[in-house]
Image: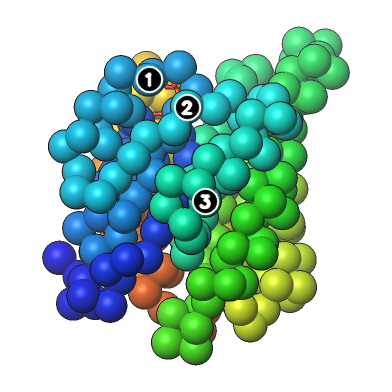
Amino acid sequence: MNSNIEDNQGRVALITGSTSGIGKAIALRLSDDGFAVVFHSRLSVEKGEKLAKATPNATYIQADLSDQAQAKHLITDVLERHGRLDVLVNNAGINAMIPHGSLQDATPEIWRDLYEVNVIAPWTLIAESENALRASSTKEHPSCVINISSHAGVRPKGASIPYAASKAALNHVTKLLALNLSPDIRVNAIAPGLVDTPMTKNWVEAQRLWGEKSPMKRGAAPSEIAHIASMLVSSTYLTGEIILSDGGLNLT
Ligand SMILES: NC(=O)c1ccc[n+]([C@@H]2O[C@H](COP(=O)([O-])OP(=O)(O)OC[C@H]3O[C@@H](n4cnc5c(N)ncnc54)[C@H](OP(=O)(O)O)[C@@H]3O)[C@@H](O)[C@H]2O)c1
């Protein structure tokens, strides 16, 4: 539990893609920290409603972020239901597994799909929530955006070149927006390595790599990434940082 729990009462956090994996862990952690959280997903409506029901002051909203109209409506909906927004976590993301040497397989369609959800949707959600984030910001609690990118956006690695490039773009957007939205809104990214979620349950090669080569000798649990998100939210000063969270694999 966070010592600032009382400070966070009445504050609202939207976590996209929060019916599973990293997003769910972040939403539950921020709820423990005292926030009213908004769960969100594309298809898993039943799961989202169940999570919201079991979590104090929480709601659930469905929206497909590959559709710009639905992305915009998500923010309107959050503001209608909760009246404010203090923290936006852009976690929802999609992946494509393509060997880096198979250039013909990485089609323009795949590039566009990945950019739509991993880069353009976070941009739209930040743009649509800027006024609300500024309105709720105080010196004690500057508002906060966290983008969940990937170690693949920092190093020349990852499930495919289009995925890695989309996350590198998200990292650069993070820094550019940190410069432009400060001091009211801090903007940071978490760049996880391997995290044990439904997305990675069949990634045998990656699991072997992290188990053998990374200093921490394993991938992360979603709750460990949620802990980093909680630290970023509770900071009043950090902005423009890409927190590489790969158990030290990048050092090897
Ligand atoms: N797991 C890892 O090892 C790892 C490593 C580095 C970075 N990441 C990044 O961390 C984030 C979360 O990954 P995860 O492994 O926790 O994923 P996950 O378990 O597959 O969950 C993805 C979530 O995003 C939602 N989502 C997907 N596409 C969407 C869309 N078009 N519109 C709205 N919501 C959508 C899903 O909703 P539905 O279930 O309803 O479709 C689900 O709630 C992603 O951005 C991923 O790239 C993950």
**Mark 1 beta carbon near ligand 1 (under 8 Å):** yes
Q: Is 78 displayed left or right of 125 in the figure?
A: left
Q: Amino acid at mark 3?
A: Leu
Whether ligand 1 has any atom under 8 Å from the Cβ at mark 2 is answered as: yes
In whole angstroms, how far apart are the C-alphas of marks 2 and 1? 6 Å
Q: Label 1 vs label 3: CA separation?
A: 20 Å
Can residue 94 be seen in the rendering of this structure?
A: no
Mark count: 3
User: What residue lies at 27% left-to-right and 68% top-to-bottom?
Assistant: 9
Seen from the viewer's position, the closer of residues 189 and 157 is 189
Classify residue 48 by image quadrant: top left
Q: Residue at 80% x, 15% y: name it.
A: 109
Tag 1 or tag 2, which sits nearer the N-term?
1
Q: Amino acid at mark 2?
A: Gln
| 3 and 2 marks in contact (CB < 8 Å) | no
Location of the N terminus by quadrant is bottom left
- Density class for disc 2 (Cα within 10 Å; few <14, some 14-19, many ≥20) is many
The answer to whether marks 1 and 3 mark residues whose Cβ atoms lie closer than 8 Å is no
User: Percent from the top left, x then y, of residue 20?
Assistant: 34, 30
For the residues labelled 3 and 2, the Cα–Cα distance comes to 15 Å
- Residue furthest to the top: 105
Q: Which residue is mark 1?
A: 45
Q: Can you identify the residue that label 2 sits on?
A: 62
Query: Can see residue 42?
Result: yes
Q: Position of residue 191 (x, y in %)?
A: 51, 52
Element assignment for label 3: helix
The residue at 72%/65% (across/down) is: 177
Query: Which disc is residue 103 wearing?
Result: none
